[in-house]
Image (cartoon, rainbow, N blue to C red):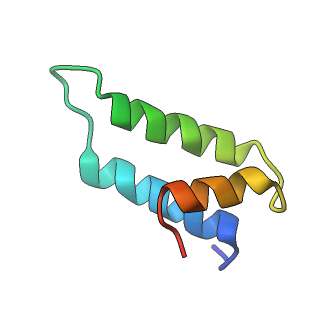
Amino acid sequence: MGDSLKDRVRQKLQRQLVEDGPDPEQDDARIISVSDDLEALEMVQADDPFIEELAARYLVF
């Protein structure tokens, strides 16, 4: 992966999913939200302002 903002946000979201892990006992709203954001990230172009919004939300520098 490169070092673009989109790549760094993707890495952060993927790491978040691995670290938090799903709880088989319940639907975790946080995991669902991170998964949804990761899916949305994959659908936008590298210059989309949504990437900056996600970077701010997940504190990606």
Instruction: Describe residue 46's horizontal placement relative to residue 52 as left or right.
Output: right
Residue 58's place in the image compared with 60, above or below, is above
- Image quarter hosting the C terminus: bottom right
Q: Position of residue 24 (x, y in %)?
A: 19, 25
Report the front residue among 55 and 24.
55
Q: How many marks?
A: 0
- Image quarter hosting the N terminus: bottom right
Residue depicted at x 58% and y 61%:
55
Residue 7 image-quadrant placement: bottom right
> Residue most toward the left?
25
Q: Position of residue 4 (x, y in %)?
A: 70, 74
> Residue most toward the bottom?
3
Q: Position of residue 38 (x, y in %)?
A: 57, 45
Residue 9 image-quadrant placement: bottom right
Instruction: Describe residue 1's horizontal placement relative to residue 18 as left or right.
Output: right
Residue 3's place in the image compared with 39, above or below, is below
Residue depicted at x 15% and y 20%:
25
Instruction: Describe residue 27's horizontal placement relative to residue 12 as left or right.
Output: left
Q: Position of residue 45 (x, y in %)?
A: 83, 53
Residue 1's place in the image compared with 37, above or below, is below
Instruction: Describe residue 21's horizontal placement relative to residue 31 as left or right.
Output: left
Residue depicted at x 47% and y 58%:
58
